[in-house]
Image: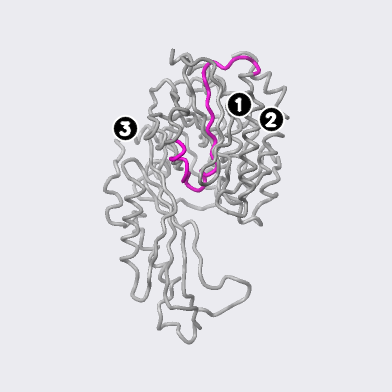
Amino acid sequence: MQGVQSYIDTHKDRFLEELFSLLRIPSVSANPDFREDVFEAAEFVADRLRDAGADQVEVCPTDGYPVVYGEKIIDPDAPTVLVYGHYDVQPADPYDLWHSPPFEPTIKDGKIYARGACDDKGQMYMHIKAFELMMQTQQLPCNIKFMIEGEEEVGSANLATYIENNRQRLKADVVLISDTSMIANDIPSIDVGLRGLSYLEVEVTGPNRDLHSGVYGGAVANPINALCQMIASLHDSNRHITIPGFYDRVQELSTSDRHLLNQAPFDEQAYMDDLGVGGLLGEKGYTTAERTGTRPTLDVNGIWGGYTGEGSKTVLPSKAYAKISMRLVPNQTSEEITMLFQKHFEQIAPQGIKVEVRPHHGGEPVVTPTDSPAYLAAAEAMTVTFGKAPIPTRGGGSIPIVALFERVLGLKSVLMGFGLDSDALHSPNEHYGLFNFYKGIETIPWFFHYFSQNTR
């Protein structure tokens, strides 16, 4: 690969300004108020693919937000890489906790602060710029296809239909994804597994209206109290999830696999210092690396009810709500876990309380091979640009599309991410390092180079 770094150095300011233009578009797929912005982001991505040299670029409608497709076929007999990413972002709420406006990208201490900077606009856009680099330096060694969606943050509800209807168009040899993290900027790593997800909302109802807490308190079930008690009962004293059948399909890692997983460098004190916590809490008998990558979890993502405005209002509320996510590991399925949760949660409701469980979306866990030509190409590429071989790790997050690619297209994925766990994904002050952005653009062409060699 000739001239990779030279091309980046020459065009790095333009690359960054283009990314900033994309980050300024508040493409929040979860909130209908941002509907037009999501469509604007799709058009932006399509235009940049055309500028970079892609053919057959199309903003493909779905029943939700569109999929952006583009390709460059240099030889029908050459291997093909399908690049996946997403242009939608998480809500930026609460806005008052941001140090700078979430949709006005700002550079501070070598990091880009903006919603979507890392997840996934910054990482997705690396691929478009790496493609441009390979086209302009005439070094694209194999075919490339892009599929960039706008509903990843809300469960990719319409992507399965799109993939089913476009099997031939999406035909490839591997999927390349940058929507994960590395251990550190000086410790490259590649995720070889992702957890699945079951995400749902619960509504707990007591009396038919809000009540005066002095008149009725102590005589009528309080939905907030009941909801808190029900949620608390979902873990025992060892942080083991108490839903019957929850662990039935969980496969324990072997002693050797656990040992290998825990070989990755980890500074527990630095981890706690970064989070501002005085201690760690999780399932007894497992390390932090095991808890966050190989064990299932259950967490409350939001809880509300009653009066939360200024001042006081002595009310016994009629309803209380919570949003709950469960991260799943291989052999668990989102459909079964959602069913088990619903059955259990309804059964533990105290007298006088009605429960409604509303599933939102889910995804399945995956494990990817470490001996495939694609994984080896990613490892070789990172070795060149980082100066050391990457460590295989298990990611704690979920990318539902990965299991879908395997089930529908028969394709394995390579999860070559360049973010860091400390990049505040889904949180106020999300950021992405300039080092990481440019390092991704530098590394991706080397992946194509080695993948084309490995598949000859």
Q: Would you name the residue on which mark 1 appears?
A: 441
Is residue 364 shown left or right of residue 443?
left
Q: Which residue is mark 2?
A: 15
Placement of 137 over or under 215, stated as above or below: above
**Vertical placement of 137 versus 428: above or below?**
above
The quadrant of the picture occupied by the C terminus is: top left
- The residue carrying mark 3 is 256
User: Looking at the image, is mark 1 or mark 3 nearer the viewer?
Assistant: 1
The segment highlighted magenta reads: 136-163
Looking at the rendered structure, the secondary structure element under dot 1 is: helix
- Secondary structure, mark 2, is helix
Name, please, the residue furthest toward the bottom. Answer: 215
- Mark 2 closeness class: few <14, some 14–19, many ≥20 residues within 10 Å: some
Q: Inspect the image, locate mark 3, and give the three-letter code of the amino acid beneath it.
A: Ser
Decide whether residue 152 is among the magenta residues: yes
What's the distance in space between the residues labelled 2 and 3, CA to CA? 44 Å
The residue type indicated by label 1 comes to Ile
Name the residue located 61 percent from the left edge and 45 percent from the top edge. 38
The image position of residue 137, as x and y in percent, is 64, 15
The residue closer to the viewer here, 148 or 198, is: 148
Residue at 49% across / 40% down in the picture?
A: 267
Q: Which image quarter: residue 5?
A: top right
Marks 2 & 1, CB-CB < 8 Å contact? yes
| Disc 3 crowd, CA 10 A, few/some/many (<14, 14-19, 20+) | few
